[in-house]
Amino acid sequence: MSLTAKDKSVVKAFWGKVSGKADVVGAEALGRMLTAYPQTKTYFSHWADLSPGSDPVKKHGSTIMGAIGNAVGVIDELVGGLSALSDLHAFKLRVDPGNFKILSHNILVTLAIHFPRDFTPEVHIAVDKFLAALSAALADKYR
Amino acid sequence: MADWTDAEKSTISAVWGQVDINEVGPLALGRVLIVYPWTQRYFGSFGDVSTAAAIMGNPKVAAHGKVVCGALDKAVKNMGNILATYKSLSETHANKLFVDPENFRVLADVLTIVIAAKFGAAFTPEIQATWQKFMKVVVAAMSSRYF
């Protein structure tokens, strides 16, 4: 389901509104994922504290949202733009790519909470498509 | 089908108690039809679903949203027995309506997003976790009669 020109411009416009709160959104989305989908905690067994709002969760949520923000910048060439991150997830982290969908869902929940008026159905579909395309690009090198 | 602690049961009742089916049902179903347009295949007789505005203004979509959301009430009132509660609805969706059970997952996720937007920060990660467990059990029960 490739991104249309309209999808890209909706995502960019919405991300303009999100970027000021990116750290908060990232931390919260990650915290929600770890709480509502406890199987995802297996990837973070090296953290002392996996609760929402903890230091490692805040730091890592910020890292993730930063990368997503960068991906908005390379939205025309996600596979190329995310190549190094795909290598990382494929060969070093070896995160099962099914989890990208789970994190995406929690990002959508967090966006709906923080931007209830802006997260319209039209924005929802564009962001959902973008996160799916991003996830596919992230999984590109897996095999 | 699943074990519920007293805390989980009261969380689900509390969340559901604040959901206005007449508002949330149409919003959730409309959003499903917009965000996942292939789901429109089930609603050929509903009239104009050609744009997001048409969908959100369509009275048949709104009415059906209330029906679907209203059926969740049965699960909330029978949490110890969700599988049995949805046996015949599952059979109807499988054998008469021919609805792909993947759609139950899709609706559950979109409903969660709509409720999150309504509740805001009050929809805490812990409440979300309990709500998503409840959605998972409902989806499994609705999928249970597909052979």
Image (cartoon, coloured by chain):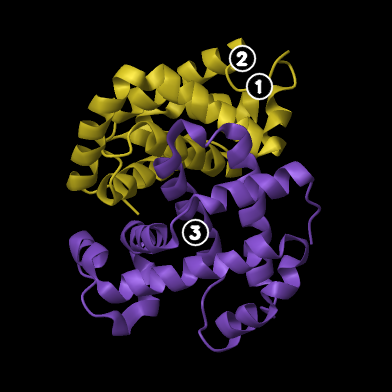
Do the CB atoms of the residues marked 3 and 2 lie less than 8 Å apart? Answer: no
Colour chain B is painted in = purple
The total number of labels drawn is 3
Residue highlighted by disc 1:
A51
* Chain ID, mark 1: A
Nearest to viewer (mark 1 / mark 3): 1
Residue at the extreme bottom of the image, as rendered = B96
Q: What residue appears at the point 43 percent right and 40 percent down from the top-left corner?
A: A108
The image shows residue A63 at horizontal and vertical percentages of: 48, 17
Of residues B125 and B15, the one drawn nearer to the viewer in this rendering: B15
The reply, left or right, for residue A99 in relation to residue B80 is left
Q: What residue appears at the point 64 percent right and 25 percent down from the top-left corner?
A: A93
Residue highlighted by disc 3:
B106
Q: Amino acid at mark 3?
A: Val
Measured along the vertical axis of the image, is residue B18 above or below residue A103? Answer: below
Measured along the vertical axis of the image, is residue A4 above or below residue A75? Answer: below
Residue highlighted by disc 2:
A54
* Chain ID, mark 3: B
Q: Quadrant of residue A45?
A: top right
Residue A66 visible to an observer of this rendering: no
The reply, left or right, for residue B16 in relation to residue B76 is left
Mark 3 and mark 2: span between their CA atoms?
Answer: 30 Å
Chain coloured yellow here:
A
For residue A138, the mark is: none
